[in-house]
Amino acid sequence: MKRRKVFITIIILLLVFTAFLLLEYKKARQPGSAAFNDTPKIDNPIVKDKEKLVLDGIRIVLDPGHGGRDIGASGQKGTIEKDITLKTAIKIKSGLEQVGADVKITRDGDNYTSLDDRVEMAAKHQADLFISIHYDAFETNDVHGMTSYYYRKEDQKIAEYIHQQIFKVDISTRNRGVSFGDYYVLRENKVPAVLLELGYLSNAEDEALINTDDFQNKVTTRIVEGVIRYYSG
Ligand SMILES: [Zn+2]
């Protein structure tokens, strides 16, 4: 009688264990579980069809303008250039990394970084591209829109690729074109460099637009797309 009880207990335990294993197996086969996705999915509209790291091996230095005691321009509604350039640059960094680029950022917090240190980082990192992010200001508040700058003639093409991509679909601001710009971070850079002025904080409409998630998402995605097009074109 006693042996029979032990036997039944073992059978019950085995059944419970088998049921547990089956449940775990079912869970693992559900979409979204770690076991179901053998390869990590890239949640980026740019690579949705290709799913390959198109910028693999490309070294990029992102440069959020200003920082620390150097606040840059400021808008009537209180937007400070150093804050918004950092926000934009961090978004671009994430977008570029998703497609395989090796990205460094000249500052990742609100700290002062000299122009020389920024340029130095690009050289040290042996970057293929340096992208400086700025938002403009003008004495009068009627000036608005975006401009992309290059210093060396050979960097004009990459500036054009990025700029054209930004304005490919409506972005609700004025296209001020691609221009030569005598900026320190372009002129003194040892690597290909562009400087993007993504709007005027001194213009109320631009300032409001710049602060929307929609604008930030659009502009950063298109900058990443522009870089991809340049390297795959
Ligand atoms: Zn600036």
Image (cartoon, grey):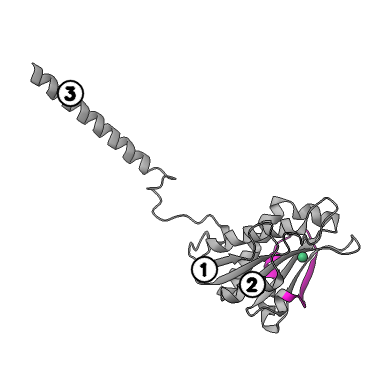
Type of the residue with mark 2: Phe
Q: Nearer the viewer, residue 164 or 137?
A: 137
Q: Which mark is residue 54?
A: 1
Q: In the figure, residue 201 lies in which quadrant? A: bottom right
Q: Residue beneath label 2, please?
A: 130
* Chain-order first, disc 1 or disc 3: 3
The answer to which image quadrant residue 133 occupies is bottom right
Query: Disc 3 versus disc 2: distance between alpha carbons?
Result: 70 Å
Type of amino acid at the residue the image marks with label 1: Val
Q: Residue at x 13, y 22 (%)?
A: 6
Label 1, secondary structure: give it. loop
Q: Specify start and end residues of the magenta stretch as a single range.
A: 161-184
**Outermost residue, bottom direction?**
153
Residue that badge 3 annotates: 9
Disc 3 crowd rating (10 Å Cα; few below 14, some 14-19, many 20+) is: few
Q: Earlier in the sequence, mark 2 or mark 1?
A: 1
Give the residue displayed 74% in from the left and 64% down from the top.
Answer: 134
Looking at the picture, how far across and down is residue 101, in whole percent?
54, 67
User: Which residue: 38% across, 53% down?
Assistant: 38
Left or right, residue 72 beside residue 125: right
- The x and y percentages for residue 116 are 69, 74
